[in-house]
Structure formats: C-alpha cells, structure tokens
Image: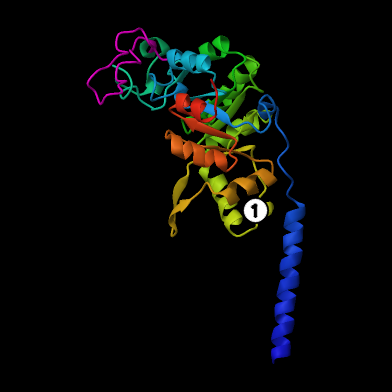
Amino acid sequence: MWRKIGIVVGVILVIGLVVYLILRSRVEPVPAHSFFAQFEPGQPLNIAHQGGEQLWPSNTMFAFQNAVDMGVDVLEMDVHQTADHVFVLIHDDTVDRTTDGSGAVKEMTLAEIQALDAGYYWTDDDGQTYPFRGQGITLPTLEEVFTTFPDMPMNIEIKPDDTAVAQSLCQLIQQYNMTNKVLIGSFHDNALTAFRAACPEVATSMTESEIRPFWILSVLGLSELYPSPAEAFQVPTTANLPVLGEVDVLTERFVSNAHRQNIIVHAWTINETAEMERLLDMGLDGIITDRPDRLQEVMGRP
C-alpha cells in the first residue's frame, strides 16, 4: 500500500515539475524600454503626483512648472476628455472639487473648463485661507503640457473607462513624438488594453487585476512564472484582498522578484519622510508623491 502511495506521489511530483518547466520556459524578463533608459541607472525617481498636490493646485501648469524647477524626475498627471474631444488634466470626472465650477468634464467644452478657477479650493490650512484663488490658474490641456515640457518625462493616468479615449490619447502622444517620454497607467483594464493595442511602443504600468497574480505567485515563491503584460508596477504599500483582508504589497520579496523579471516598481502615494526612507531602502525604482520637496531632501538632492 505504502509503495503504491509513493508511486502516486512520485508521479504527481514529476507531472508538477514538467508543468513548472513548461510554464517557466514561456516566461522571459520584460525587455528594457527606452522610457526608463533616460534615467540614471540605480537612481530612484521623484515622481511629482499631479505636480505636487500638497504644495500647489494639482494638475495645473503652475504646479508642473514649480515641480520642474524643483528638479523632479517625472511629472504625474491625470487625463480626461472634454465634450469637444480635447484632453485636459484633472483628477476627478467632475470639476466640482477643485474648481469654482460644477459639472462633468466630458459634458463641458474646453472653453467652459478653462474659464474656471483651478486654484479655487486649494488650501494647506484646513480652509482658513485659499492662497491661489483668483490667480488666473486654469486647467491645462495635455497638448499644452507636451509643448511646454517636451523633454520632461511624464506619467499619465487614463481616468475614464473608455477605449475610444485611450485610442485618442495614443494618437496625441504619437503626434507630439512623446512615445519615449511617457509612461501610461489606468485603473481600467479595458482602457489600458485598448491603449496598448494602439500604442505598443509606449511603456505602461499595470492594473490591479494584472498585479494581483504576480503578488500571489511572489508569496508562493513562483513569481518567475508570471508573464508580465507591461513594464512597471505602480502600487500602494498595502491593499485589501478578498478573504485575506489587508496585506502588505510592497515587501522586499515583491520588489526583488519584480526586478528579477526586469519589472520597474513605483510606490504611491507616499508623503511622509520616514516612509519614503523605508521604501527606498527596499530598492524601489521610484516614489509617486504629493510632497516632491520632501523626497528631494530624502534623496539628498539640493
């Protein structure tokens, strides 16, 4: 009886090994992408979230210019499309939270949106003062950012779950010869899949549904079986998963396993100095932050 059990176990192990070897043979490290080649090897990136949301009105030319002057490595921004099919930079799908207007971005024309005060609600003292009200700060178009900062690397998030918007974004990136200057992300699988199909030459990060299998395989010690669909992970430090509840996403194992497959790892959104230091010690490739000034100091930059 024990002999038969041993034979069955042995057969199962052999089959498992064969399956593992077949799956392993089909996975190659992610090819190096020119977007990341423009940075100094081994140096983590300071990625200014919306230009530095805790420092200036977010997703505005004022914020982006200040971030560039500060010496950040990458400008991070969010795009929506107006009713007249122009890409504007704003985080929410409405203008209500950050401007003195009201309404859905996709239902407003560019002229209507740019008539709004994009600095209206920004405050750093819990609403006691609003220092940027009435200063002429408006929501910019993506074209304006491309023409103003043609050599600046950009991290662009597609906010709408809309494949047509994703395809139009590809066309604009190609039109302005920014294919090697941008990294594209989205929370929406359909939008990101459509973008990759239209612009396979552009670097992309991964959605939650693409990251989760890698995290599981990494925990199991099988991350080498993960066929990566993109060049970068952009992840929070923790996440809530079904059954498991809150788990640590960014661990030394996760980062090292990603690097073995040449996958870039960025953390978001990290604003406290101690946390920046902890994550950089893991060997992260970059941090997305509302406080790029603090990250500059942590990195020892003037």
Q: Quadrant of residue 175?
A: top right
Quarter of the rendering containing residue 101: top left
- Place of residue 295 in the rendered image (x, y in percent of width and height, measured from the top left): 49, 29
Stretch in magenta: 114-139
Question: Is residue 148 placed above or below 262 in the rendered structure?
Answer: above
Residue 180 image-quadrant placement: top right
Vertical comparison of 118 with 93: above or below: above
In depth, the one of 117 and 200 nearer the eye is 117
Describe residue 221's horizontal placement relative to residue 302 as left or right.
right
Provide the residue designation for mark 1: 223
Q: Main secondary structure of the magenta part?
A: loop
Q: Is residue 120 magenta?
A: yes
Q: Position of residue 190 (x, y in %)?
A: 54, 38
At x 70%, y 79%, the residue is: 9
Query: Residue 160's spot in the image, x, y percent?
Result: 46, 30
Residue 86 visible in rendering: no
Number of residue marks: 1
- The three-letter amino acid code for the residue at tag 1 is Ser
Residue 209 in view of the camera: yes
Please name the residue shown 31% across and 25% down the image.
97
Q: Position of residue 68 (x, y in %)?
A: 52, 16
For label 1, the crowd category at 10 Å Cα-Cα, with few meaning under 14, some 14 to 19 and many 20 or more, is: many
Q: Secondary structure at mark 1?
A: helix
Question: Is 162 part of what is drawn in magenta?
Answer: no
Side of 238 where 121 appears, left or right: left
